[in-house]
Image: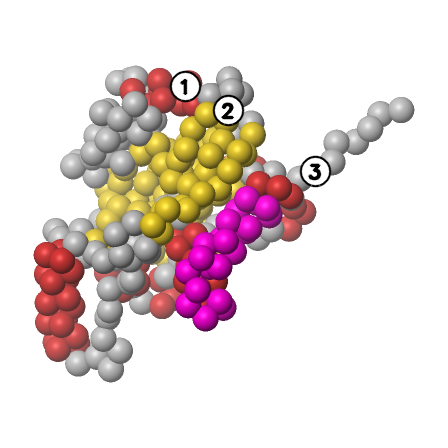
């Protein structure tokens, strides 16, 4: 089986799936700039040298995910030998080498993107999107605990694995985020939308800010907002990575959520005299 070479661009915050485990949705780009989704991945259980970072080039044995109708969806042939990290693209020259892969196909109209998602000949489920205007970045409190039944099953399974492995570092399920973070924005047609962001980095930023603010959740949320609204939206050339969920892809009026951001510095246009 020939390995697929993928530039990792997306790692969503872990979720619980009772059929599998604590899982992360990973997505990225082939060398030609086309999207690919890799799921399921029990990321935090991978060996340390297999725990890929964003913008790592990885080589992986993939097979089509037959349980998912979205054409970008693949799954690892074997989790045990899932990833070989073979390179990394840094931020040199204001992300120039990342841009060459990422910005080959950018949507600026949400209606166009949604139409392509609903079109049975396309079924687009991953996209780079350029908002025309960022209006706000909001946070809302949500359920603080994982689904009890799923959590009990996963904890029981983890306990069994820890016993068999005789591990000194037992696996613990990641904490659930108590807040939902969303961008409010408009596109080139002045269509206004509010989309939540499920990037792992957003969740980790919240936990880091919470620690820095001695457990003050309001200050932590305000710090997250400052990073995304004041910094990314205010001083950077901001793009969204958008993705659909399989369940709502064909049902929801807008099936997309934000699964990551791409944010090089703004480049001043040269003036011609």
Q: Which marked residue is nearer to the observer: mark 1 or mark 3?
A: 1
Q: Report the colour scheme.
A: secondary structure
Which SS does the magenta portion mostly show? helix
Q: In the image, 132: left or right of 220?
A: right
Q: Earlier in the sequence, mark 1 or mark 2?
A: 1
Q: Quadrant of the C terminus?
A: top right
Tell me residue 15's x, y (percent). Answer: 25, 52
Extent of the magenta region: 212-232
Asked whether residue 82 is in view, the answer is no
Asked whether residue 119 is in view, the answer is yes
The residue indicated by pointer 1 is 111
Res. 267 mark: 3
Above or below 57: residue 214: below
Above or below 223: residue 212: below
Q: Give the number of marks.
A: 3
Disc 1 from disc 3: Cα separation? 28 Å
Disc 3 from disc 2: Cα separation? 20 Å
The residue indicated by pointer 2 is 187
Tell me residue 200's x, y (percent). Answer: 39, 53
Q: Earlier in the sequence, mark 3 or mark 2?
A: 2
């Amino acid at each position: 089986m020939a390995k697929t070479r993928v530039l990792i661009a997306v790692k969503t915050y872990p979720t619980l799936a009772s059929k599998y485990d604590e899982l992360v949705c990973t997505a990225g780009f082939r060398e030609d700039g086309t999207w690919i989704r890799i799921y399921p991945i029990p990321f935090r259980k991978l060996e340390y040298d297999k725990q890929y970072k964003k913008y790592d080039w990885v080589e992986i044995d993939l097979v089509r995910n037959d349980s998912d109708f979205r054409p970008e969806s693949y799954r690892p042939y074997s989790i045990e030998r899932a990833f070989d990290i073979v390179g990394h693209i840094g931020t040199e020259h204001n992300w120039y080498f990342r841009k060459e892969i990422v910005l080959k196909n950018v949507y600026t109209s949400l209606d166009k993107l949604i139409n392509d998602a609903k079109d049975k000949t396309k079924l687009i489920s991953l996209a780079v999107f350029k908002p025309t205007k960022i209006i706000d970045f909001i946070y809302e409190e949500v359920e603080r605990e994982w689904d009890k039944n799923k959590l009990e099953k996963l904890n029981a399974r983890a306990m069994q694995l820890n016993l068999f492995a005789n591990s000194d570092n037992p696996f613990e399920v990641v904490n659930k985020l108590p807040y939902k973070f969303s961008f409010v924005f408009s596109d080139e047609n002045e269509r206004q939308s509010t989309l939540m962001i499920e990037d792992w980095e957003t969740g980790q930023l919240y936990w880091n800010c919470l620690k820095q603010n001695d457990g003050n959740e309001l200050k932590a949320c305000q710090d997250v907002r400052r990073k995304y609204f004041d910094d990314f939206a205010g001083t950077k050339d901001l793009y969204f990575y958008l993705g659909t969920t399989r369940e709502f892809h064909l049902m929801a009026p807008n099936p997309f959520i934000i699964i990551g951001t791409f944010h090089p510095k703004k480049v001043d246009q040269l003036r011609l005299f």
